[in-house]
Amino acid sequence: MDRGFLDFAISCQVMPKWHVKSSTIDSLMNELSDEILTLEEVAAYLKAGRRTVYRLAANGQIPAFKLGGTWRFRRTELDQWIAARISTQGKSNLDEGES
């Protein structure tokens, strides 16, 4: 559960604000940062096909490692990879607009 979800749940009154302690949020965030995802979970997370995620992992284009012959992904590394790609694409879009 990420902090955005907790904020959303609180705003929708699904989870009362008084019910969520700061220490609980911190421990949930730590759990998420250590979370290991499968190829199927990453495909759902990125809203991409399983073959696409597999190809990216096999070509070293996405942070991944193999465990027992199957691809695994650390959520924190994926989030950093996404942020870097967004940052790079934003810069290239700005560069194109300046010409």
Image: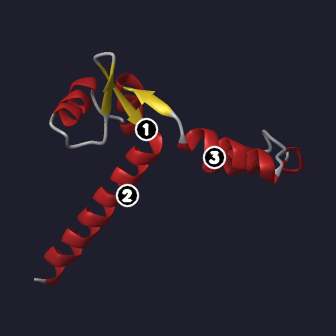
Q: How many marks?
A: 3
User: Residue 39, located in which quarter of the rendered image?
Assistant: top left
Q: Is residue 28 left or right of residue 74?
A: right
Label at residue 74: 1
**Residue picked out by circle 2:** 83
Residue 12 is left or right of residue 80, and the answer is right
* Residue occupying the point 36% across, 38% down: 46
Badge number at residue 29: 3
For the residue marked with disc 1, what is the amino acid?
Arg
Q: Is residue 51 above or below residue 16?
A: above
Q: Going from the N terminus, do you reach mark 3 or mark 1 first?
A: 3
Q: Earlier in the sequence, mark 3 or mark 2?
A: 3
* Amino acid type at mark 3: Met
Q: Secondary structure at mark 1?
A: strand
Q: State the image coordinates of residue 43 (x, y, percent, origin top left).
A: 35, 30
Residue 24 percent across, percent down from the top left: 77, 44
**Mark 2: which amino acid?**
Ala
